[in-house]
Image: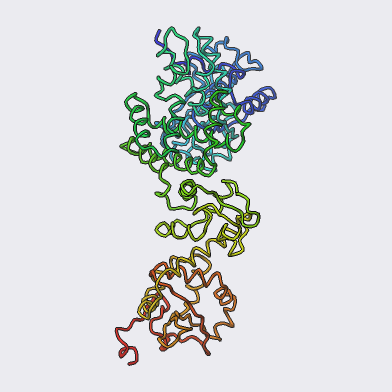
Amino acid sequence: MSYLALYRKFRPTSFDEVKGQDHIVTTLKNQLAGDRIGHAYLFCGTRGTGKTSVAKLLARTLNCDNPTENGPCGECPSCKANLNGTDMNVHEIDAATNNGVDNMRQLNENIRNIPMNNKHLIYIIDEAHMLTGAAFNAMLKTLEEPPEYAVFILATTDDYTIPITVKSRCQRFDFHRISVETITDRLEEVVAMEGEKATRDALSYIARAADGSLRDALSILDECMAASMGKELDRDSVLNTVGAVKVDIYFDLLGAITENDPERVLNIINDAVWDGKDLTKFADDFTWFVRNMLFMKLSPNIGSELDMTSENVNRMKSVGADISTSVLSRYLGILQELCSSIRKSSIQRVTFEMAMIKLMHPETDVDVESLIRRIDALENRSGGPAYDPETNQEISRIESREVEALVDARLEKKLPKLLKEMGPVASAPTSVEESNTAHKYGINLRDPAAVNQKQGEIIDNNLRKSFPPAEYEDLQKVSNIFRAKILPQLKNPLKLYLREDEVPLDVDKNYRIGSTLKLLMIFYDVDLEENHVHYTYYRKEENKAYLENTISNYIQKNVEIEYVVRKGKKPIIDEDSLAINKIAGKINTYENEEERNG
């Protein structure tokens, strides 16, 4: 007799053998006991969770001559015929290949035939989401009002593709992913029935690798038992068979990343590749490793929930003590992207290596969080942490990073100069007066929200003032390109207001405040009566500064804005302005002063 795969050999023959789906088993058993059988069922859930097995078990129970509380008897002619695949009253349809309207029409014809020697005529439609729209429409009437002896069981992994008209005619059961503990217990039972030996640690790893699918777990177990025939199956044997790596490698790899040692990282990857390890699996497991370390950092007592030995739990706590939660969160985000991209990559090794480089070099990122490690490194080199100016007490490293992470990524070129001015990461203070630039601006470092707003304003304003003053030609350029180039870079609601109001920009050589030439934003008093809310928003100091900073950053010149209110109503064409953005994005430009005056 040919060998039968474990997942087929140990398919449930009673409801008690169905693992991890107690909510479904209880409902079906109550329906059978109370003779409340539905005419159509929809079994939904991920792969390997028992949809087809429960469908077959339900079909066998419905036609069993001597059903029990736990399902079919397994001894009557109907049960034997079903187990042998000769039952003429149970039809299994693979919707992946029989998905057309003609197949459903044939089903509608066949369902008229009364079942032989049994109570029910049962149709199990597997992969039901593969049916075409026309096929679903063809079976709707039959599904709604089938003969009293007919029962439909539809199984699918993609229930969202099933038409709502079909779902409303079925009783829906959602199959959950099976827990690691439940899968491990079932694997132990299977190993014992096969007369083999395996450690709990090995079976637990298989259960975790199966990702909630008992069928996947049995398939992996089948392969591992064949690879270690006659020997006790241990964790190392499982790792070698599935192409995974030992946890020591993850500790070594994480250490190399945190120490910024690219040569060591490359050697670890090289060894894994030459040992035949699956880089996709490597990326998945390393992601889980970092995820476990992050949770260990957030909740030190969670070790028992992470499916790890006590030795590794203690080791992980020790290693994680030197890595902040924000850094681990950044690592986890990059690794999640790696797990997705490496499956689509034609050169998996390069994809993996690039992700490791990105982990070591936060400067390759452009978000604010990525600066945490960079500023942390500056602080370590300077030898001094940040101090609270009010108490002259050292701020914890996490609090200090919360403040320092507010630095905008676009200031990379000017970061050393600004950090020196801001104080906290430049050097350890020697007195309260010298402790921090934040004290100068009245910032309380204990209030991250206040620091976030105030420090951002200070840095942006410092950057703008570091530019040379805008000249007449620079302001002309701003007037010409504002609507097309600068306006899209603004944030709402400022961008929305400026686009809606079509505020004209102007520049006048004779309009200066002190020695500074101003960019004029023209408002008309009649229009202000209708849009006073917008005008009030424009005049807020923080909004005005934000607009000045954005324009200055774009042209790399210090631009200051002055609001001017004129009498009357804005004309369709403003003849007093040199270069104004008009309705529908029109821009009036003049090649020389004579053309303008003419």
Here the colouring is: rainbow
Look at the image and tell me in which quarter the N terminus lies: top left
Look at the image and tell me in which quarter the C terminus lies: bottom left
Label count reads: 0
Residue at the far front: name it: 430
From this view, report whether residue 484 is shown above or below residue 447: below
Pick the front one: 310 or 240 = 310
Rendered residue at 60%/49% (across/down):
395
Q: Note whether residue 121 is visible.
A: no
From this view, report whether residue 288 is shown above or below residue 114: below
> Picture coordinates of residue 488 (x, y %)?
43, 66
Pick the front one: 384 or 91 = 384
Residue at the far bottom: name it: 598
Residue at the far right: name it: 34
From this view, report whether residue 173 is shown above or below residue 392: above
> Picture coordinates of residue 259 (x, y %)?
43, 38
From this view, report whether residue 593 is shown above or below residue 67: below
Pick the front one: 10 or 565 = 565
Pick the front one: 589 or 162 = 589
Q: Quadrant of residue 77?
A: top right
> Picture coordinates of residue 69 (x, y %)?
66, 17
Q: Note whether residue 433 is visible.
A: yes
Q: Quadrant of residue 340?
A: top left
> Picture coordinates of residue 597 (x, y %)?
34, 92
